[in-house]
Image: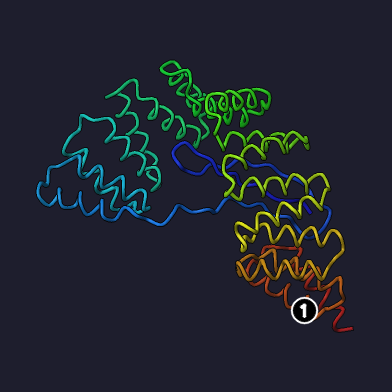
Amino acid sequence: MSLVTRTITFGLLGSLFFLNACRNSNTQVQQQHGKDTSHVAVDTIGPKITVYTGRINSNANDADAYWNRGKLEVLQKNYGPAFNDFTKTVKIDSTKDNYYSSLADVDFILGHTREAKAGFEKCISLNPGNTDAMLKLGEIYFYVKKYKEAKDLADRALKVNIHLAQAYFMKGLIFLEEGDTGKALSSMQTAVEQKSSYFNAYIQMGLIYSSKHSIHALDYFNSAQNIDPHSIQPYYEKGMFYQSVGDYDNAMNSYSQLLQIDSTNSHALYNMGFISFLKEDYNKGIYYFSRTLKSDSTYTMAYYARGNCYEQLNDLNKALDDYTKTIKQNPDIKAAQESYNEVKAKLHK
């Protein structure tokens, strides 16, 4: 059975883009790929919002107060109120590029891609040296696969400031999408030379080397881990690397370290079940797949994988139950339907 898509989180806007890398498996059970789910600290900015609200109540045309309140609302992920505040800001004062940039940021988050593009273009027209807006506009072009336009904007930003790590990172992603891993690595390396704490660049270089099954991947994942010891992603990617080269003990160790940070991470738990299945330790597989489902009852493949384990142990009634749950959640999984039919036939002999 063919395997899965890795989802990588990165962004200059804080948005999500997706790069895909596939691997293969000869078993029915599939390893799954996850993303960092760490969260921002508890909000402590409510009193500041109250201050800006007071200013607005005193002066309905205080553009700066709307803008500052909007930025605080973004930090709280209250994007609707932030959008309203930034919209009022540009209506009150249409001469400031940072007002348009903030509105465009929220437009992009809300899926208003066309409006975001127009906002960043307006921002650049007001301030031709605004490299932040250039890179964000470039990211929009990247998102719609217009790589030449995105690369041109990165180069334009570098003409303003040759030390912009984000611009080199963007070019690296573009080269990677174009299939030139050599240039991608070169650009990523330049990014970390400009900004030694560039977490995403280290992760991305690690992923490139990991796709080549190169031990150098671990160096980059370890660098990212040193930058942010509380992020689950370096541990996860190290686990995936070890798993891909068949070093299951180190893979399990990496996932175990991840679980010390996030004990309910369903992707790591699933992969630990997957490894247990490969090692024919079916009881341990059932344990990890059950923990996966306790963490996320909608994790369809965990039902199917656990059913595989039960079937291997000849516990056919439990296997049939898990295959039934798999089909109920996703009728399009043909292998589950086939397994269901085979087990049902055995039970009726």
Instruction: Name the residue at the top extreme.
Output: 159
Task: Report the residue at 47% width, 24% height from top.
Answer: 164
Helix, strand or loop status at disc 1: helix
The image quarter containing residue 212 is top right
Foreground residue among 323 and 342:
323
In the rendered image, residue 120, in percent from the top left (x then y), is placed at 35, 32
Task: Locate residue 175 relative to residue 280 in the image: left or right.
Answer: left
Task: Report the residue at 32% width, 35% height from top.
Answer: 101
Task: Report the residue at 77% width, 46% height from top.
Answer: 242
Query: Compared to 116, does 57 lie above or below?
Result: below
The C terminus - image quarter: bottom right
Instruction: Name the residue at the right extreme.
Output: 349
Query: Compared to 247, does 296 lie above or below?
Result: below
Task: Locate residue 134 relative to residue 340 in the image: left or right.
Answer: left
Foreground residue among 226 and 266:
226
Instruction: Name the residue at the left extreme.
Output: 58
In the rendered image, residue 17, in percent from the top left (x then y), is placed at 53, 41
In the rendered image, residue 307, in percent from the top left (x then y), is placed at 77, 71
Foreground residue among 172 and 253:
253
Instruction: Kindly identify the amino acid type of the residue bearing the numbered disc 1.
Output: Lys
Residue that label 1 marks? 318
The image quarter containing residue 30 is bottom right
The N terminus - image quarter: bottom right
Query: Compared to 204, does 257 lie above or below?
Result: below
